[in-house]
Image (cartoon, grey):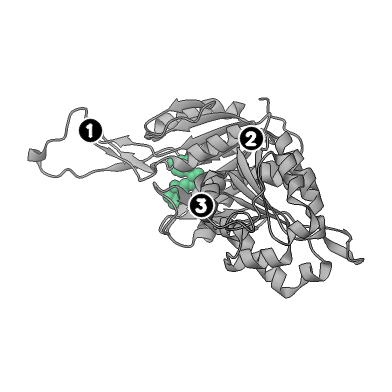
Amino acid sequence: MRIALGVTGGVAAYKAAELVRLLQDRGLDVQVIMTRNACQFVRPLTFAALSGHRVITEMFGEEGREANVESAIEHIAVAESLDALLVAPATADVVAKIAHGLADDFLTTLVLATRAPLIVAPAMNVNMWESAATRHNIAVLRERGVRVVEPEAGPLACGMTGPGRLASLEAITAAVLAALGIAGDLKGETILVTAGRTEEPLDAVRYLANRSSGKMGYAVAEAGRRRGARVILVSGPTHLEAPAGVQIERVRTAEEMAEAVLRHAGEASVVVMAAAVADFRPAEVDSGKIKRGNGPPILRLEPTRDILAEISPRRRPGQLIVGFAAETDHVVENAAAKLRQKNLDLVVANDVTQAGAGFDVDTNIVTLVFPDGTVKPLAKMSKLEVAARILDEVAAIRARTAPREVAG
Ligand code: CTP
């Protein structure tokens, strides 16, 4: 995987050299980009030697040389090739520029041009960190889905003491690995994921279904596997390919899905119910094809099994259950009600009426709702990134609670 490390002009810039090493140790290819001010603190040659790549310092090729077409569009090529973009250390100035969408050098242009996840590790004087402007800018970054690795408190280069020191290089590396979904922090977990829709037959050729494509559940399965978990994916009908390394069981109806989930629930330490299960099915199924000539039939429906409601009372000690809530109104209230009724550890709520959320798109806009009443709205992001955030929460809950008691 390829990441870009943007180094900006702060005293902590020298620490970025060690960061290159740590990231490489995790198998990442690192392209370093330095702002002009960063070059005042550390020479680009240091980073070039460590990373094995030319360090990008200028928007239009090297200083003193005439710009050419390649250098003028290089930021687009780099932007497209990245799996993640890290800015460390990030000065108050670069944080402000990112928050406002300014693009006056290579790094800030790259931030706008890339769709890869962005991780920002600020380092600055304590008063600058606590200033109203920086507080606001950091909040804006977070709202947009940027991962901010908070600075630590301690003695600062300016002689003052307080928060502002660059976070530990281990914490920054962990944030990058989490953004890439390769943290390995779910090793030993068995995650049971449901995905896609169910189809409830009406006759030999027709069925009732909903619009779910399965993309969200498949993203959770993929993200779980990348983080070291064993993953069992119970999938309704979909055109998606099974993620490599995931045990898949394909089902069609709610009844088949319920049966598969209950069969595997005993092995699972984490259950993520992303499937859009049909709530009703035709009460009578015609084994042939219902003919037009007989006039429009009146359909009588009956409820399907509520799989989530069945597994939650049987949960094993330490088993975490994550539900989804597809809503069209009162999203958080409805999701919180589902969380309470079904005794869940987390509900991922999405307003399926919003553009860029819900069915058959690659992005989602969700709000995470927790049993203690905490509500975390996430920005619009790719379903793989949403999956990473859900699993971040699973890992955090696991870290807070007793060690796993469910056998893998
Ligand atoms: N779910 C389930 N079995 C069902 C229906 C839903 O396991 N028969 C799960 C879904 O996978 C999801 C959660 O329950 O994790 C909530 O699904 P949703 O359709 O949002 O809610 P419902 O419980 O069906 O309630 P309502 O239709 O009233 O919103």
Q: Nearer the viewer, residue 24 or 68?
A: 68
Mark nearer the viewer, 2 or 1: 2
Residue on which disc 1 sits? 203
Residue 76 numbered tag: 3
- Location of residue 303 in the rendering, given as x and y in whole percent from the top left corner: 38, 41
Quarter of the picture containing the C terminus is top right
Alpha-carbon span between mark 2 and mark 3: 29 Å
Which element carries disc 3, helix, strand or loop? helix
Q: Residue furthest front?
A: 65
* Contact between labelled residues 3 and 1, with CB atoms less than 8 Å apart: no
Whichever of labels 2 and 1 marks the residue nearer the N terminus, that label is: 1
- Location of residue 216 in the rendering, given as x and y in whole percent from the top left corner: 48, 43
Identify which amino acid the numbered label 1 is placed on: Asp
Identify which amino acid the numbered label 3 is placed on: Ile
- Location of residue 44 in the rendering, given as x and y in whole percent from the top left corner: 73, 50
Q: State which quadrant residue 367 falls in.
A: bottom right
Identify which amino acid the numbered label 2 is placed on: Arg
Whichever of labels 1 and 3 marks the residue nearer the N terminus, that label is: 3
- Location of residue 87 in the rendering, given as x and y in whole percent from the top left corner: 68, 54
Is residue 397 visible to us here? no
Residue 227 numbered tag: 2
Residue 254 numbered tag: none
Q: Nearer the viewer, residue 113 or 396?
A: 113
Counting other residues with Cα less than 10 Å from the Cα at mark 3, is it few (<14), some (14-19), or many (20 or more)?
A: some
Q: State which quadrant residue 191 falls in.
A: top right
**Pointer 3 residue Cβ closer than 8 Å to ligand 1:** no
Whichever of labels 2 and 3 marks the residue nearer the N terminus, that label is: 3
